[in-house]
Image (cartoon, rainbow, N blue to C red):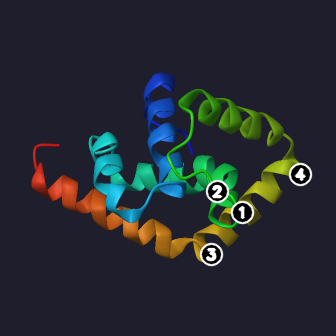
């Protein structure tokens, strides 16, 4: 899916969404503010296609990153992953993995999505 965002905007969204995998649910409100001006469908696509494949590991490792990720490292990691997924075979594997993630971490997405919806409802002009 092509994004309607500039590269700079997309990278800012990557950084905000990566932190969904590292901060407590109480912090989702702040993260939702960071992406409030973007359509919910687009946030969801970026979450599952760009960010989740790179940062889901943080949910299961024994020493997870708890204070958020370094923004530069987020951008580099996602760019590297996108670069790896250019062949037809890798694109197919990526699509399968994203389908698995949509099932496996759906609850995490739903929690964050509800906060985004709250933010959008509290700022209807957005």
Gap between marks 1 and 2, in whole Å?
6 Å
Q: Which residue is mark 3?
A: 104
Q: Secondary structure at mark 2?
A: loop
- In the displayed structure image, the side of residue 1 where residue 39 appears, left or right: left
Q: Residue at x 70, y 59 (%)?
A: 57
- Local crowd size for mark 3, using a 10 Å CA cut-off: few (<14), some (14–19), many (≥20): few
Taking the image as shown, residue 125 lies to the left or right of residue 87, namely left
Tell me if residue 40 comes above or below residue 6 in the rendering: below
At x 44% / y 42%, what residue is drawn?
A: 16
Observer-nearest residue: 1 or 24?
A: 24
Q: Which residue is mark 2?
A: 64
Asked if the residue under mark 4 is in contact with the one under mark 2, i.e. CB atoms within 8 Å, the reply is: no
Q: Given this view, does label 3 or label 2 mark the residue nearer the observer?
A: 2
- Marker disc for residue 89: 4
* Whether residue 7 is situated above or below residue 87 in the rendered picture: above
Outermost residue on the front side: it is 63
Q: Looking at the image, is mark 4 or mark 3 earlier in the sequence? A: 4
Tell me the element at label 1.
Answer: loop
The x and y percentages for residue 103 are 60, 76
Read off the residue under disc 1: 61
Secondary structure of residue under mark 3:
helix
Instruction: Give the label, 2 or 4, closer to the camera.
Output: 2
Do the CB atoms of the residues marked 1 and 2 lie less than 8 Å apart?
yes
Label 1 Cα crowd, 10 Å radius (few <14 / some 14-19 / many 20+): few
Q: Residue at x 54, y 39 (%)?
A: 2
Image quarter where the C terminus lies is: top left
Position in image of residue 31 (x %, y %): 35, 48
- Observer-nearest of 64 and 33: 64
CA–CA distance in space, label 3 to label 2: 18 Å
Instruction: Answer with left or right where residue 118 lies relative to residue 53.
Output: left
């Amino acid at each position: 899916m092509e994004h309607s965002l500039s590269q700079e905007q997309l990278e800012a969204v990557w950084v905000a969404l990566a932190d969904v995998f590292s901060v407590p649910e109480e912090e989702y409100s702040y993260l939702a503010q960071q992406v409030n001006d973007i359509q919910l469908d687009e946030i969801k696509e970026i979450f599952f296609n760009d960010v989740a494949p790179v940062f889901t590991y943080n949910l299961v490792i024994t020493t997870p990153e708890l204070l958020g990720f370094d923004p530069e490292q987020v951008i580099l990691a996602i760019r590297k992953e996108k670069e790896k997924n250019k062949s037809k075979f890798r694109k197919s594997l990526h699509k399968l993995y994203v389908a698995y993630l949509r099932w496996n971490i759906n609850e995490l997405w739903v929690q964050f999505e509800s906060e985004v919806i709250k933010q959008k409802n509290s700022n209807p002009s957005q």
